Image (spheres, grey):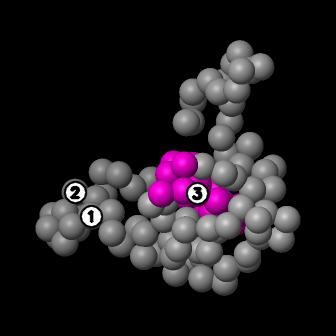
Amino acid sequence: KPGATYGAAHTGTRDLHRDLISARAVIAHSSMVSVEAALLGVPAFADCYSPTRLLGFTDRAQMADPPQPGNRLEWAHTLAGRQWTLEEIAHGHFLNHMDF
């Protein structure tokens, strides 16, 4: 989690973005970290109902040669389009969550 400490040998905070861009792949349960990794182009293998499963990252045996889906941008648009209701969009409530 951004800003959190993680890793038994690590005592400070880590920069998730830095760690993700230097990662070969990410394995997660159903974490948003897998989505952030996929947005950066890092293969993100996840269990359960993670949206990254829709990109084909389902079999850990693929880690040696992970899929390189060409629909990553379309997937991100679809994912973003499901974050707010039409009413929230119509009233501009979603703007409070945007980083312009």
Q: Name which residue lies at 45% across and 60% down.
A: 49
Q: Nearer the viewer, mark 3 or mark 2?
A: 3
Do labels 3 and 2 touch, CB within 8 Å?
A: no
Up the image or down, 39 lies above or below 12; here it is: below
Residue 91 drawn in magenta: no
Mark number displayed over residue 13: none
Q: Earlier in the sequence, mark 3 or mark 2?
A: 3
Q: Residues within 10 Å of mark 3 (few under 14, many from 20)?
A: many
The local secondary structure at tag 2 comes to helix
Mark number displayed over residue 93: 2
Q: Which residues, given as a range, are shown in magenta?
A: 29-48
Mark number displayed over residue 84: 1
Q: CA distance from mark 3 to mark 2?
A: 31 Å
Q: Earlier in the sequence, mark 1 or mark 2?
A: 1
List x then y, in percent, for residue 25. Answer: 75, 56
Q: Is residue 36 visible?
A: no
